[in-house]
Image (cartoon, coloured by chain):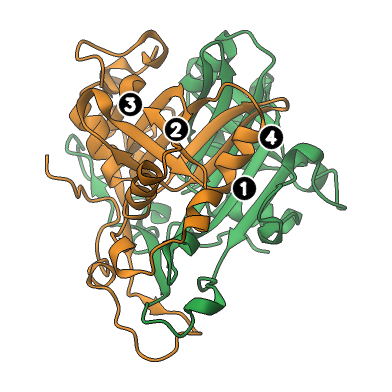
Chain colours: A orange, B green
């Protein structure tokens, strides 16, 4: 990320600033732990937000979030300069205070604002597609490689992480003094997302073996940190 | 919802139309099963997408999605006509095809586009806040009621469901004929989000009992359908 000294004006959070963390490591570890992104663009009919697969490549100032697919095509057809917002959120729990005004959620989120650019060079595009594909489970190498036509059909976009901010809430509710001796319960209900056992497709022929990376998902927390810090 | 005969032009999906379902029931059941929304608005610096709690009220043509809080305040301060997009996504699994070009995810999502309006009448606002609070777990009645000041401080927005569309992908990957006799595995890895056991706050005094609705969350699929169809 370009800045070590704080967020850019448009990623500064006006409220809840104490929850904001701007460190590169936080942004990266949350992006690594997420499963999908919600991507916002502006259309003639107002904003639209769509769920998309994503990946992350590069380090430091060159780091980018990568998105792709049919949705990207629709966005590009709009013919605009493509300002986007890519948001990744992991909900870690429900925070229940003594009064609903202080209820909250524990979560980790990253907001990436910036201008998306298309990745055109075939080799670069292929690498980007592999990174997106392998974000959750690295199955690229054990599948049939994509054809040149497949790659041509897919649009891949990159958004610099230069203007990324992370926000994390963890721990207990924060209640008011007047409520501390009251009769009301307070606490946290954790939320965990877990991959299940791989279910072979109904039309599977023969007995192809399940890739080890797929077997390894079973029982795993989908939002655990997978990248060495 | 206003239309029974199809989506409005701006919610028509140009691709993947076979996955699109427009029925009121699908929209409502997905909104009922979601935990958070990703809300997109347009700012002077481009689109921004933020995670928010939400609720749903009303039926048929009067149904609305409700959002609130500090973020809504920031949005309102922008002084624009508030075109928003409220997107709720539940990821149900990873879809692994014989080639990565056909990889996908199983998911349920709803995209609500429209103009948000503030709910101002105090009684109406209080009811709306309760609906948002009780979306995941109805804890409103067992907590200390919010003060008049708390309610005044909170901005609540409603977005009509008139222009809502649902999109669902379920089941096996769809591969190409040329890959069916190949050596590559294909299948689905399910993803399940589960509430855990309630963890009492560290600063709890006395022994207030845990509300039954909180205890009932433990072990429950966070995205199960909770509303009678």
Quickly name the residue at label 1.
B110
* Mark 1 secondary-structure assignment: strand
Q: Marks 4 and 2: same chain?
A: no
Badge 2 crowding class, 10 Å Cα cut-off, few under 14, some 14 to 19, many 20 or more, is: many
- Confirm whether residue B145 shows in the render: no
**Cα distance, mark 4 to mark 1?**
10 Å
Residue furthest to the left in view is A229
- How many angstroms separate mark 2 from mark 1 (CA)? 18 Å
Q: Which residue is mark 4?
A: B113
The answer to whether dots 1 and 3 both sit on one chain is: no
Relative side of A14 to B163, left or right: left
Image: B166 above or below A87: below
Residue count near mark 1 (Cα–Cα under 10 Å), binned few <14, some 14–19, many ≥20 = many
Can you tell which mark lies on residue A57? none
Name the residue located 34 percent from the left edge and 18 percent from the top edge.
A16
Of circles 3 and 4, the one toward us is 3
Q: Which mark is residue A161?
A: 3
The quadrant in which residue B194 appears is bottom left
Relative to A2, residue A187 above or below: below
Up-down relation of residue B138 to residue A76 (above or below): below
- Residue A46 horizontal side relative to residue B185, left or right: right
- For marks 2 and 3, give the one nearer the viewer: 3
Q: Pinpoint the chain carrying mark 3.
A: A
Q: Secondary structure at mark 3?
A: helix
Residue located beneath label 2 in the image = A86
């Amino acid at each position: 990320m370009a800045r070590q000294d704080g967020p850019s004006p448009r990623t500064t959070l006006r409220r809840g600033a104490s929850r904001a963390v701007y460190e590169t490591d936080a942004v990266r570890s949350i992006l690594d732990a997420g499963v999908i992104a919600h991507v916002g663009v502006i259309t003639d009919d107002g904003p639209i937000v769509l769920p998309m697969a994503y990946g992350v490549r590069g380090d430091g100032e060159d780091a980018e979030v990568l998105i792709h697919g049919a949705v990207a095509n629709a966005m590009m057809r709009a013919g605009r300069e493509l300002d986007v917002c890519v948001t990744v959120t992991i909900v870690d729990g429900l925070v229940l205070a003594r009064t609903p005004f202080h209820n909250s959620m524990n979560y980790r989120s990253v907001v990436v604002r910036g201008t998306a650019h298309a990745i055109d060079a075939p080799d670069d595009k292929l690498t980007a597609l592999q990174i997106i594909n392998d974000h959750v489970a690295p199955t690229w190498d054990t599948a049939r490689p994509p054809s040149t036509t497949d790659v041509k059909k897919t649009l891949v976009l990159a958004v610099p992480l230069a203007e990324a901010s992370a926000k994390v809430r963890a721990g207990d509710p924060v209640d008011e003094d007047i409520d501390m001796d009251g009769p009301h319960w307070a606490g946290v209900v954790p939320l965990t997302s877990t991959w299940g056992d791989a279910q072979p497709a109904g039309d599977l022929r023969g007995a192809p073996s399940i890739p080890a990376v797929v077997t390894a998902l079973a029982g795993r927390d989908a939002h655990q940190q997978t990248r060495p810090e």
